[in-house]
Amino acid sequence: MHYRKAIDFSWSKLDIARNTVSRLDRFVHKLRSSQKGPVSSEIDQLIYDLGHKFTEAMDDDLNIAPALAALFEFIHHINHMVDSKGLEPSDRNKIEDILSRLNSVLMVMDLTEAEPSKQIEELIAERVYARQKKDWAKADKIRNELKKLGVEVIDTKAGARWRKIR
């Protein structure tokens, strides 16, 4: 298959791609752990705009840059909603649906619901206990153990949350 442009590979571009995937993973985690909020009248229009811009970009010789720009513009709007008022579960489902459709093309987002293993649950509980006892060295040691297992711990006001890292 021939494209109009040659592939432009560099290690720095690979790092940028890795960071892009990480941003997408963080967004999916934030979306799933968001507080319940009111129904938003904006969601349907944002989803329509994203789908339209993404399809238009991909139809233009697989022009990924504007496709990702549309996705990150969408993410920016949704992050603002999550931070300011939360999301209604039906809106969250609509967002997950569009992400799933886009991911059928991109194949970079991990949209599976992560279930912690017993070992991960125990380590997280042990870390929470260490933090309550202000044993920061032990809490940091456990955080590093979890990281080796592919788990990032995020400390929030509501407690410790975690997400898979790749």
Image (cartoon, rainbow, N blue to C red):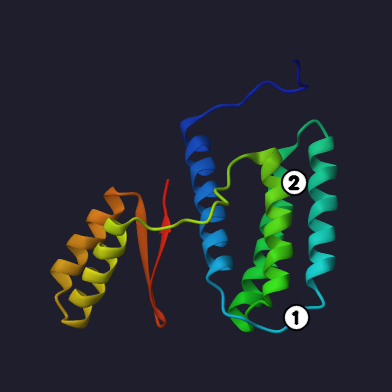
Q: Which residue is mark 1?
A: 39
Q: Nearer the viewer, residue 94 or 136?
A: 94
Label 1, residues with CA under 10 Å away: few <14, some 14-19, many ≥20: some
Q: Residue furthest top?
A: 1
* Residue 82 image offset from top left, x and y in percent: 61, 75
Screen quadrant of the C terminus: top left
The residue at 57%/79% (across/down) is 35
Relative to 118, is 7 on the left or the right?
A: right
The residue at 27%/48% (across/down) is 148
Of callouts 1 and 2, the N-terminal one: 1
* Residue 5 image offset from top left, x and y in percent: 73, 23
Quarter location, residue 107 = top right
Q: Which residue is mark 2?
A: 66
Judged from the image, the secondary structure of the residue bearing numbered disc 2 is: helix
Relative to 152, is 82 on the left or the right?
A: right
* Residue 86 image offset from top left, x and y in percent: 62, 80
Screen quadrant of the N terminus: top right
Quarter location, residue 28 = bottom right
Quarter location, residue 46 = bottom right
**What's under tag 1, amino acid-wise?**
Val
**Position above or below: 55 against 124:** above
The residue at 49%/43% (across/down) is 18
**Position above or below: 134 against 151:** below
Q: Nearer the viewer, residue 9 or 24?
A: 24
Judged from the image, the secondary structure of the residue bearing numbered disc 1 is: loop
The residue at 66%/76% (across/down) is 87
**What's under tag 2, amino acid-wise?**
Pro
Label 2, residues with CA under 10 Å away: few <14, some 14-19, many ≥20: some
* Residue 92 image offset from top left, x and y in percent: 67, 68
Q: Nearer the viewer, residue 80 or 10?
A: 80
Q: CA distance from mark 1 to mark 2?
A: 29 Å
